[in-house]
Amino acid sequence: MAGTRCFALLLVALCAPAVHAATETWMVKVQGTPAGAMTVDRGDDGVVRVDYSFRDNGRGPDMKEEFTVDAAQRPTRYQVRGKATMGGELREDFNHAEGRIRWTSTADSGDEPAPEGNLFVPLQSSPAYYGQLLRALLARPERSAPVGAASVLTAEKLVAVQLDGPAGPVPVALYAVTGGGSAPWYLWLRDDGSLGYFGLAWPGWQLPPAGHEWNAALLIEKQRTAQQERLRAIRQRTAQPLPGLTVVQNVRWFDARAATMRGPADVYLFDGRIGAITAPGAVDAQPQQRIDGSGRTLLPGLIDMHAHMWPDAGLLHLAGGVTTVRDLANHNDDLMLLKRRIDSGEFAGPHIVPAGLIEGQSPFSLRRGVVAADLDAALRAVDGYAARGYRQIKLYNSIKPEWVKPLTARAHQHGMTVAGHVPAFMRAEEAVAAGFDELTHINQLMLNFFVKPDQDTRTLLRFTLVGDEARRVGIDSPAARRFIALLRRHGTAVDPTLATFEAMFTQRDGELNPALGDVADHLPVLWRRGLRQSEMSPGAGQVLRYRASWARMVAFTGALHRAGVPLVAGTDDTPGLMLHRELKLYVQAGIAPLEVLRIATWNGARVAGITDRAGSIERGKPADLVLVDGDPGRDIGELRKASLVIQGGQAYAPAALYQAAGFRPFVPGAKIEAAAAAAAK
């Protein structure tokens, strides 16, 4: 799976339709290729009718919606019908009248008092509706409005640009809408008084107006600059320098190689590196800063081995104690630019280990990385990634099975490893035999036992088939034992990403998302409501099968670990918070918490090839560390109580990072005291 919930919010918060024409159409473009369309019809009756559909990586929404707008540009009545991105039902209505908002959806319903100024955000709506919300905000002097309990949407104009168009100059402006999620919604509107939608300018995902395709690069750059200024300011506000010598006193610390807790100890940091680990009070080194580690645990920075980074995601990763991520599919130039900005200290975020995605050309292609039309092009892509220092290649769904062996051989010649999805019309054991060093996603492993040669797993079948059939896989069956033995014999690593599938296979509409339900009170209000919407909307009988299959996937993960198959911890979902859930699911699979911590640190560093700088607390290594209130070696859930994250010569309080991202913190930040002040107490 690709993308995260944050990115999904950005995709739906795109535009406001122009008001100078009754009907207009925008083409959805993914990596420059048409992928769908949105048509907006503004009737004389004041009703806006929207037809919106697209496909990216075989997934996407199909929705028809209607909403009525009052004189203040506020939507007062709304209806949507259709299918969500993962195929679940879309059905929602609301009405704002007589000082109340009444709504019903597949996930919830309500009837609440609401002043005339309130706005309403559906669970999933078209770009046109989000654009209408922006127009409603701009119609107010303060450019803000309440939306739900304790949440306010605010619009800010960031930059104005004059574009050259086929009919002459076109003034446009970029706005940011904050308060809806963990990142602002960036929207381009016409700046000619109409406030009509102009276009979307995200890298790789755009809705350009006809005749303005060449302006996309300029708009992307202007938007990127505005986003960068925001992130620089957050980094300057939240980073706490650790000059000279710092000591974390009397702290329990995790020995990741041995998977055991040690201490208490004093851990000294100097010039961004771990200087010494001593008994408490054993040396008088006269540090400049002291941090009280009593009752706390010092861990190596967590490693998310399945991320898809975007600039705003860095805050949530660090807040969750994740100091390194492996990015498994992205737009290469943008990812490397983000990596450089983080490495230089310009942005706050985790270190990025990029994997080079290679996808085959097909109607189902994931249009990131390199999309190859033939084997020669794919081989050249391997060479290109190797020349740029990549450590790993990721192969994807539309790679032809006969390409896998020559591609893995070429990657191995360059000293690179190969991971990825099992290509369509191929089984996992065949991919391993052909040279795969790592398999991603537990569903890709389970398909090995029942997928038929003619079944196309580039579609949603790779999820629905697993939901129907995985429950039949016997963990101790001869087929399972042979497959696990094959993985162990080849040393094949597995990145299960259990947490990203949990709600998909177990949640019905109206039920709380099990992966993030326990942190719902910490999320922005619009996220909270979305936690009750199922991605696939399984029926009553279907969900029983899916839940049984989900339980079998968790059990299979535990069986892999017991057999000696190396696991790494990745999410492919909400940064930071979802990794905590992933690790908790490993405990549910029967893996001891200390072993789970090793999976999230040392295993990740070893498989990613970065043990020289990450994965363990050792003298001389960079100080990528997480201080946790409590002992996650006993209760893995205490990982959410990170009170300080140290990255080289800078420290961050997760509480401050969560607040900057619009989340409610879990624990206060640990204090960094000047040594003289600490000694005087």
Image: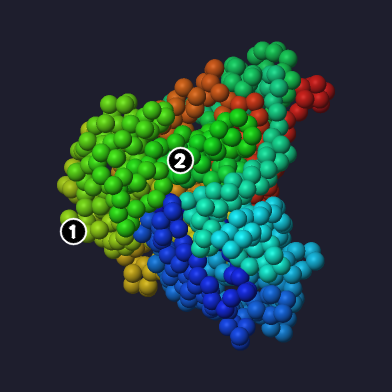
Percent from the top left, x then y, of residue 495? 37, 42
Q: Quadrant of residue 647?
A: top right
Residue drawn 57% across the image and 78% down it = 22
Answer with left or right where residue 234 lies relative to residue 580: right
In this view, the residue in front, 206 or 232, is 206
- The answer to whether residue 520 is seen in the rendering is no
Instruction: Give the mark, 2 or 1, whose residue is nearer the N terminus.
Output: 2
Residue drawn 62% across the image and 61% down it = 168
Q: Residue furthest front?
A: 167
Q: Which residue is mark 1?
A: 454
Q: Name the amino acid type tagged 2.
A: Asn
Percent from the top left, x then y, of residue 300? 53, 30
Q: Quadrant of residue 344?
A: top right
In this view, the residue in front, 399 or 8, is 399
Q: Name the amino acid type tagged 1.
A: Asp
Q: CA distance from mark 2 to mark 1?
A: 33 Å
Mark number displayed over residue 602 = none
Percent from the top left, x then y, of residue 523? 61, 56
Q: Quadrant of the C terminus?
A: top right
Element type at mark 2: helix
Residue drawn 68% across the image and 69% down it = 194
**Dot 2 alpha-carbon crowd within 10 angstroms: few under 14, some 14 to 19, many 20 or more:** some
Which is more foreground, mark 2 or mark 1? 2
Q: Which residue is mark 2?
A: 332
Q: Residue furthest bottom?
A: 45
Residue drawn 69% across the image and 13% down it = 285
Percent from the top left, x then y, of residue 676? 80, 21
**Dot 1 alpha-carbon crowd within 10 angstroms: few under 14, some 14 to 19, many 20 or more:** few
